[in-house]
Image (cartoon, rainbow, N blue to C red):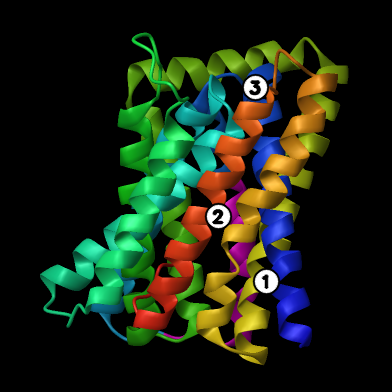
């Protein structure tokens, strides 16, 4: 049963990384493109894996893995845009739901045999996503960042599909290195946009005049990316120890951890984690997470891979 604990630990680290991302975007690195640019620079650490199995398996595998990384970088900008001015406990499950729906659409388009359980799973995911997205009863002025959420969810889903194909055409280390290089050059491509280039350079100049803030931001950023890295490692390791389907089904716990972390932090940092704390909000969010969890579990029983 060690793989269950390892998977839960991985999803906990992922939730912690999302909390750090939200805090940094709200107070330290306010432009999502700037934050994504620093993530791209950090991705070069993947080059240290080159001595451990990096080989050239053909240009098709290179292009697939590389483009996966580029698309993932652009999807991060959309994700961070959604995080910036919205409840992280609402945005993260919603993006995860869109990513899962992307998997179903892909399975349908490639001719995957879809049974009734697949459509039942999709129904639970959509209902859960609806409850996460909207406060009941519905209000006219309800604000949900639909465009960045959809762009992030679909982009991450397609990126993972390409990455998975890249691992098939290469080996793990080769696919990893080329995808991280794609993330890096995707970040460099942001400099070709005058608006984004100005944001990146302006932030660089601002930080030089505030050395104390630079140090704090750097520490928090490294903690965020370390948490994300540990989360990914634990989940991959859990898959190697036990059932892939069971590990995927546990992914709903990431949203539970995220909610449990965000609620108390909203009391300490109300301007950053603007979480709604009424009893009805608690009931609705927990109910939505339960529905998403059931949808994920049904999907894993049907054999559809959700990348979560």
Q: Residue at x 60, y 83 (%)?
A: 239
Q: Is the residue 195 above or below the residue 116 in the image?
A: above
Span of residues in magenta: 40-55
Which of the two marks, 1 or 2, is nearer to us in this view? 2
Residue 48 part of the magenta segment = yes
Asked which quadrant contains residue 38, the reply is top right
How would you classify the magenta stretch by its main secondary structure?
helix
Quarter of the image containing the N terminus? bottom right
The answer to whether the residue labelled 2 contacts the one labelled 3, judged by CB atoms less than 8 Å apart, is no
Q: Secondary structure at mark 1?
A: helix
| Residue beneath disc 1 | 233
In the image, which disc is placed on residue 290? 2
Left/right of residue 95 with respect to residue 240 in the rendered view? left
Q: Report whether residue 253 is seen.
A: yes
Q: Is the residue 9 above or below the residue 289 in the image?
A: below
Residue 123 part of the magenta segment = no
The answer to whether the residue labelled 3 contacts the one labelled 1, judged by CB atoms less than 8 Å apart, is no
Which of the two marks, 3 or 1, is nearer to us in this view? 3
Tell me the distance, in whole angstroms, between the alpha carbons under discs 2 and 3.
Answer: 18 Å
Label 2 or label 3, whichever comes before in sequence order: 3
Q: Secondary structure at mark 3?
A: loop
| Residue beneath disc 3 | 276
Residue 259 location (% of width, % of height): 68, 41
Q: Residue at x 50, y 69 (%)?
A: 177
Residue 94 location (% of width, % of height): 44, 42
Seen from the viewer's position, the closer of residues 274 and 281 is 281
């Amino acid at each position: 049963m060690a793989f269950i604990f390892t998977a839960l630990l991985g999803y906990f680290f992922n939730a912690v990384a999302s909390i750090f991302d939200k805090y940094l975007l709200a107070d330290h690195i306010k432009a999502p493109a700037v934050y994504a640019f620093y993530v791209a620079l950090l991705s070069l650490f993947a080059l240290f894996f080159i001595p451990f199995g990096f080989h050239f398996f053909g240009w098709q595998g290179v292009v697939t893995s590389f483009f996966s990384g580029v698309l993932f970088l652009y999807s991060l900008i959309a994700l961070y845009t959604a995080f910036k001015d919205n409840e992280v406990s609402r945005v993260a499950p919603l993006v995860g739901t869109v990513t899962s729906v992307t998997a179903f659409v892909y399975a349908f388009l490639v001719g995957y045999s879809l049974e009734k359980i697949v459509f039942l799973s999709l129904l639970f995911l959509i209902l859960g996503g609806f409850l996460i997205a909207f406060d009941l009863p519905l209000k006219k002025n309800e604000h949900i960042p639909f465009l960045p959420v959809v762009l992030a969810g679909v982009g991450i889903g397609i990126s993972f599909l390409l990455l998975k194909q890249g691992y098939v055409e290469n080996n793990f280390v080769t696919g990893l290195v080329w995808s991280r290089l794609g993330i890096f050059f995707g970040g460099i491509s942001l400099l070709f946009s005058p608006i984004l280039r100005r944001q990146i350079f302006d932030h660089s100049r601002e930080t030089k005049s505030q050395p104390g803030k630079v140090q704090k931001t750097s520490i928090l950023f490294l903690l965020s990316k370390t948490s994300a890295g540990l989360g990914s490692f634990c989940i991959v390791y859990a898959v190697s120890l036990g059932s892939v389907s069971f590990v995927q089904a546990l992914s709903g716990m990431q949203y539970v951890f995220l909610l449990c972390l965000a609620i108390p932090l909203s009391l300490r940092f109300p301007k950053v984690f603007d979480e709604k704390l009424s009893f009805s909000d608690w009931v609705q969010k927990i109910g939505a997470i339960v529905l998403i969890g059931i949808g994920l579990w049904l999907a894993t029983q049907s054999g559809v891979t959700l990348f979560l």
